[in-house]
Image (cartoon, rainbow, N blue to C red):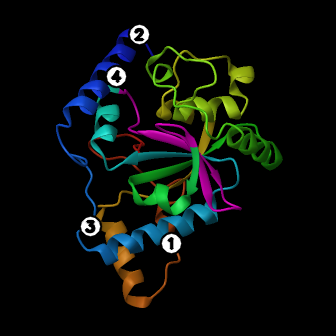
Amino acid sequence: MSRLASFTIAVSLLALTLGGCWDGSLYGTRPKDKVLDDAIDRMWTAELRKYARDGDWILSRSLSSTGDMIGWVTPGENFSHASVIDVTNGTIVEAITPVVREIPIETLVHRNWYLVVVRPSHMTAEEQKAALEKARAEIGKPFDMYGFVGYPEEDKWYCSELAYWSHGFEEKSGKQVLVMPNELMEFGEVIYYTGRRDDPQVLATAAGHVNDGHDDGHDTAVAGASTDTDEVTVELVP
Protein backbone atom coordinates (compact mmCIF):
# COMPACT_ATOMS: atom_id res chain seq x y z
CA MET A 1 0.00 0.00 0.00
CA SER A 2 1.35 3.46 -0.88
CA ARG A 3 2.31 6.12 1.65
CA LEU A 4 -0.53 8.23 0.24
CA ALA A 5 -3.02 5.48 1.01
CA SER A 6 -1.50 5.12 4.47
CA PHE A 7 -1.85 8.85 5.03
CA THR A 8 -5.48 8.67 3.92
CA ILE A 9 -6.16 5.94 6.46
CA ALA A 10 -4.44 7.94 9.18
CA VAL A 11 -6.39 11.11 8.46
CA SER A 12 -9.70 9.27 8.13
CA LEU A 13 -9.31 7.32 11.36
CA LEU A 14 -8.12 10.40 13.22
CA ALA A 15 -11.13 12.33 11.99
CA LEU A 16 -13.38 9.49 13.10
CA THR A 17 -11.77 9.24 16.50
CA LEU A 18 -11.91 12.95 17.18
CA GLY A 19 -15.15 13.77 15.47
CA GLY A 20 -17.39 10.90 16.54
CA CYS A 21 -19.55 11.53 13.46
CA TRP A 22 -21.82 8.52 13.93
CA ASP A 23 -22.35 5.44 16.07
CA GLY A 24 -22.44 1.97 14.57
CA SER A 25 -22.11 1.05 10.90
CA LEU A 26 -23.81 2.83 8.03
CA TYR A 27 -23.85 -0.44 6.07
CA GLY A 28 -24.40 -3.45 8.29
CA THR A 29 -27.19 -3.80 10.82
CA ARG A 30 -27.87 -5.92 13.86
CA PRO A 31 -31.27 -7.62 14.33
CA LYS A 32 -33.49 -5.58 16.61
CA ASP A 33 -34.72 -8.79 18.16
CA LYS A 34 -32.06 -9.61 20.79
CA VAL A 35 -33.14 -13.25 20.93
CA LEU A 36 -32.46 -13.57 17.20
CA ASP A 37 -29.18 -11.68 17.45
CA ASP A 38 -28.03 -13.93 20.29
CA ALA A 39 -28.97 -16.98 18.21
CA ILE A 40 -26.70 -15.75 15.41
CA ASP A 41 -23.87 -15.32 17.91
CA ARG A 42 -24.30 -18.88 19.17
CA MET A 43 -24.59 -20.28 15.65
CA TRP A 44 -21.46 -18.55 14.39
CA THR A 45 -19.47 -19.41 17.51
CA ALA A 46 -20.36 -23.08 17.06
CA GLU A 47 -19.36 -22.92 13.40
CA LEU A 48 -16.01 -21.29 14.14
CA ARG A 49 -15.29 -24.05 16.64
CA LYS A 50 -16.32 -26.65 14.04
CA TYR A 51 -14.42 -25.39 10.97
CA ALA A 52 -11.40 -23.53 12.35
CA ARG A 53 -8.31 -24.99 13.95
CA ASP A 54 -5.81 -23.52 16.39
CA GLY A 55 -3.75 -20.80 14.72
CA ASP A 56 -6.16 -19.97 11.88
CA TRP A 57 -6.70 -16.30 11.12
CA ILE A 58 -10.12 -14.73 11.65
CA LEU A 59 -10.79 -11.80 9.33
CA SER A 60 -13.81 -9.77 10.32
CA ARG A 61 -15.89 -6.71 9.52
CA SER A 62 -17.21 -4.91 12.54
CA LEU A 63 -20.55 -3.19 13.05
CA SER A 64 -18.77 0.06 13.85
CA SER A 65 -17.97 3.41 12.32
CA THR A 66 -14.28 2.50 12.52
CA GLY A 67 -14.98 -0.58 10.40
CA ASP A 68 -16.76 1.61 7.86
CA MET A 69 -13.80 3.97 7.64
CA ILE A 70 -11.28 1.16 7.18
CA GLY A 71 -13.52 -0.33 4.50
CA TRP A 72 -13.78 2.98 2.66
CA VAL A 73 -10.05 3.63 2.43
CA THR A 74 -8.85 0.04 1.89
CA PRO A 75 -9.08 -1.37 -1.65
CA GLY A 76 -10.26 -4.94 -2.19
CA GLU A 77 -12.11 -7.14 0.29
CA ASN A 78 -13.77 -5.21 3.09
CA PHE A 79 -12.35 -6.37 6.42
CA SER A 80 -11.67 -4.19 9.44
CA HIS A 81 -9.77 -6.59 11.71
CA ALA A 82 -7.63 -9.73 11.94
CA SER A 83 -7.09 -12.05 14.88
CA VAL A 84 -5.72 -15.53 15.66
CA ILE A 85 -8.06 -18.21 16.97
CA ASP A 86 -7.49 -20.75 19.73
CA VAL A 87 -10.28 -23.27 19.19
CA THR A 88 -9.04 -25.51 22.00
CA ASN A 89 -9.51 -22.82 24.65
CA GLY A 90 -12.34 -20.93 22.94
CA THR A 91 -10.46 -17.64 22.60
CA ILE A 92 -8.85 -15.33 20.07
CA VAL A 93 -5.64 -13.31 20.35
CA GLU A 94 -5.87 -9.83 18.87
CA ALA A 95 -3.85 -6.63 18.64
CA ILE A 96 -6.28 -3.84 19.38
CA THR A 97 -6.11 -0.53 21.21
CA PRO A 98 -4.65 -0.21 23.73
CA VAL A 99 -2.80 -3.57 23.89
CA VAL A 100 -2.61 -7.12 22.51
CA ARG A 101 -5.15 -9.20 24.41
CA GLU A 102 -7.00 -12.55 24.54
CA ILE A 103 -10.80 -12.63 24.59
CA PRO A 104 -13.54 -15.27 24.20
CA ILE A 105 -14.59 -16.20 20.67
CA GLU A 106 -18.12 -15.11 21.60
CA THR A 107 -16.92 -11.56 22.26
CA LEU A 108 -15.35 -11.30 18.82
CA VAL A 109 -18.40 -12.80 17.13
CA HIS A 110 -20.88 -10.47 18.83
CA ARG A 111 -19.28 -7.26 17.63
CA ASN A 112 -19.05 -8.26 13.96
CA TRP A 113 -21.18 -8.05 10.85
CA TYR A 114 -19.45 -11.08 9.33
CA LEU A 115 -16.33 -13.23 9.78
CA VAL A 116 -14.08 -15.41 7.62
CA VAL A 117 -11.65 -18.15 8.64
CA VAL A 118 -8.40 -18.11 6.67
CA ARG A 119 -5.92 -21.00 7.02
CA PRO A 120 -2.34 -19.78 6.51
CA SER A 121 -0.64 -21.45 3.55
CA HIS A 122 1.88 -24.27 3.84
CA MET A 123 1.57 -24.70 7.60
CA THR A 124 0.90 -27.90 9.50
CA ALA A 125 -1.49 -27.97 12.44
CA GLU A 126 1.49 -28.12 14.81
CA GLU A 127 3.16 -25.15 13.12
CA GLN A 128 -0.07 -23.19 13.46
CA LYS A 129 -0.26 -24.01 17.16
CA ALA A 130 3.29 -22.74 17.57
CA ALA A 131 2.35 -19.54 15.72
CA LEU A 132 -0.64 -19.10 18.04
CA GLU A 133 1.65 -19.35 21.07
CA LYS A 134 4.02 -16.86 19.47
CA ALA A 135 1.13 -14.40 19.12
CA ARG A 136 -0.03 -15.13 22.67
CA ALA A 137 3.44 -14.31 24.01
CA GLU A 138 2.87 -10.72 22.81
CA ILE A 139 -0.19 -10.18 25.04
CA GLY A 140 0.17 -6.87 26.83
CA LYS A 141 2.29 -5.26 24.11
CA PRO A 142 1.01 -1.83 22.99
CA PHE A 143 -1.05 -1.25 19.85
CA ASP A 144 1.10 -0.10 16.90
CA MET A 145 -0.85 2.97 15.77
CA TYR A 146 1.96 4.29 13.57
CA GLY A 147 2.52 0.81 12.12
CA PHE A 148 -1.11 0.73 11.04
CA VAL A 149 -0.39 3.67 8.76
CA GLY A 150 2.93 2.38 7.41
CA TYR A 151 5.47 3.40 10.06
CA PRO A 152 5.88 0.33 12.32
CA GLU A 153 7.39 0.58 15.78
CA GLU A 154 9.35 -2.13 17.60
CA ASP A 155 7.52 -4.17 20.25
CA LYS A 156 4.13 -2.83 19.19
CA TRP A 157 1.51 -4.52 17.01
CA TYR A 158 -1.58 -3.78 14.97
CA CYS A 159 -3.97 -6.62 14.18
CA SER A 160 -2.82 -7.98 10.82
CA GLU A 161 0.84 -7.19 11.55
CA LEU A 162 0.73 -9.55 14.54
CA ALA A 163 -1.00 -12.28 12.53
CA TYR A 164 1.49 -12.00 9.63
CA TRP A 165 4.56 -11.93 11.88
CA SER A 166 3.53 -14.68 14.32
CA HIS A 167 2.98 -17.14 11.48
CA GLY A 168 6.45 -16.59 10.07
CA PHE A 169 5.52 -14.75 6.90
CA GLU A 170 8.20 -12.11 7.39
CA GLU A 171 10.74 -14.90 6.85
CA LYS A 172 8.74 -16.58 4.07
CA SER A 173 7.52 -13.59 2.07
CA GLY A 174 9.43 -10.60 3.40
CA LYS A 175 8.71 -7.83 5.85
CA GLN A 176 5.85 -5.60 4.70
CA VAL A 177 5.64 -1.86 5.24
CA LEU A 178 1.93 -2.28 5.85
CA VAL A 179 -0.24 -5.42 5.91
CA MET A 180 -3.97 -4.70 5.93
CA PRO A 181 -6.38 -7.39 7.17
CA ASN A 182 -7.69 -8.17 3.67
CA GLU A 183 -4.15 -8.74 2.40
CA LEU A 184 -3.79 -11.79 4.65
CA MET A 185 -6.02 -13.62 2.17
CA GLU A 186 -3.02 -13.64 -0.19
CA PHE A 187 -1.20 -15.87 2.31
CA GLY A 188 -3.90 -18.43 3.04
CA GLU A 189 -7.09 -20.21 2.04
CA VAL A 190 -10.64 -19.26 3.00
CA ILE A 191 -12.08 -22.12 5.05
CA TYR A 192 -15.36 -20.65 6.25
CA TYR A 193 -17.56 -17.57 5.84
CA THR A 194 -20.41 -16.73 8.19
CA GLY A 195 -22.57 -14.75 5.81
CA ARG A 196 -23.77 -11.31 6.92
CA ARG A 197 -25.59 -10.82 10.18
CA ASP A 198 -28.43 -9.02 8.38
CA ASP A 199 -28.60 -11.42 5.41
CA PRO A 200 -32.11 -12.94 5.04
CA GLN A 201 -30.73 -16.49 4.89
CA VAL A 202 -28.70 -16.04 8.07
CA LEU A 203 -31.69 -14.48 9.82
CA ALA A 204 -33.99 -17.29 8.69
CA THR A 205 -31.56 -19.98 9.82
CA ALA A 206 -31.10 -18.32 13.21
CA ALA A 207 -34.88 -17.97 13.58
CA GLY A 208 -35.22 -21.69 12.90
CA HIS A 209 -32.74 -22.39 15.67
CA VAL A 210 -34.72 -20.21 18.06
CA ASN A 211 -37.88 -22.15 17.21
CA ASP A 212 -36.43 -25.66 17.44
CA GLY A 213 -33.84 -25.02 20.15
CA HIS A 214 -30.84 -26.10 18.07
CA ASP A 215 -27.67 -24.15 17.30
CA ASP A 216 -26.01 -26.55 14.89
CA GLY A 217 -24.90 -24.09 12.21
CA HIS A 218 -25.61 -23.72 8.51
CA ASP A 219 -23.56 -25.40 5.79
CA THR A 220 -24.26 -22.77 3.12
CA ALA A 221 -21.62 -20.49 4.64
CA VAL A 222 -18.72 -22.95 4.40
CA ALA A 223 -15.86 -22.21 2.01
CA GLY A 224 -17.03 -22.54 -1.57
CA ALA A 225 -20.27 -20.66 -1.02
CA SER A 226 -20.48 -17.38 -2.90
CA THR A 227 -19.91 -14.19 -0.92
CA ASP A 228 -20.32 -11.81 -3.87
CA THR A 229 -22.74 -8.90 -3.67
CA ASP A 230 -23.15 -5.65 -5.56
CA GLU A 231 -20.84 -3.97 -3.07
CA VAL A 232 -18.04 -6.46 -2.43
CA THR A 233 -16.11 -9.42 -3.72
CA VAL A 234 -15.25 -11.65 -0.75
CA GLU A 235 -16.15 -9.07 1.83
CA LEU A 236 -15.99 -9.84 4.78
CA VAL A 237 -13.55 -4.14 15.10
CA PRO A 238 -11.71 -3.16 16.10
Please state which of the two labelled residues, at mark 2 or mark 1, is closer to the viewer: 2
Which element is circle 4 on? Answer: helix
What kind of residue is marked 3? Pro
Residue toward you, 62 or 218 = 62
What amino acid does circle 4 point to?
Ile
> Quadrant location of residue 231?
top left
Q: Position of residue 109 (x, y in %)?
A: 46, 58
Give me the C-alpha separation between circle 2 and circle 4: 10 Å
Residue 216 at x, y percent in the picture? 53, 77
The secondary element bearing badge 3 is classed as loop
* Residue at x 49%, y 34% (from the top left corner): 181
In front: 41, or 101?
Answer: 101
- Give x and y (percent) for residue 157: 57, 29
> On the image, numbered disc 1 is attached to which residue?
217
The answer to which of marks 2 and 1 sits earlier in the sequence is 2
* Residue linked to disc 3: 31
Label 3, label 1: how many angstroms apart (C-alpha)? 18 Å
> Nearest the camera: 139 or 12?
139
Say which of marks 3 and 1 sits in front: 3
Q: Residue at x 19, y 31 (%)?
A: 19
Look at the numbered discs 3 and 4 and tell me whether their residues touch, using CB distance below 8 Å. Answer: no
- Residue for badge 2: 3
Q: Toward the viewer: 86 or 229?
A: 86
Cα–Cα span, label 2 and label 1:
42 Å
Task: Write down the region rendered in magenta.
Answer: 74-100
Q: In the image, residue 144 lies at what x, y percent?
A: 51, 26
Q: Residues within 10 Å of mark 1 (few under 14, many from 20)?
A: many
**Residue for badge 4:** 9
Disc 2 marks a residue whose amino acid type is: Arg
Quadrant, the N terminus: top left
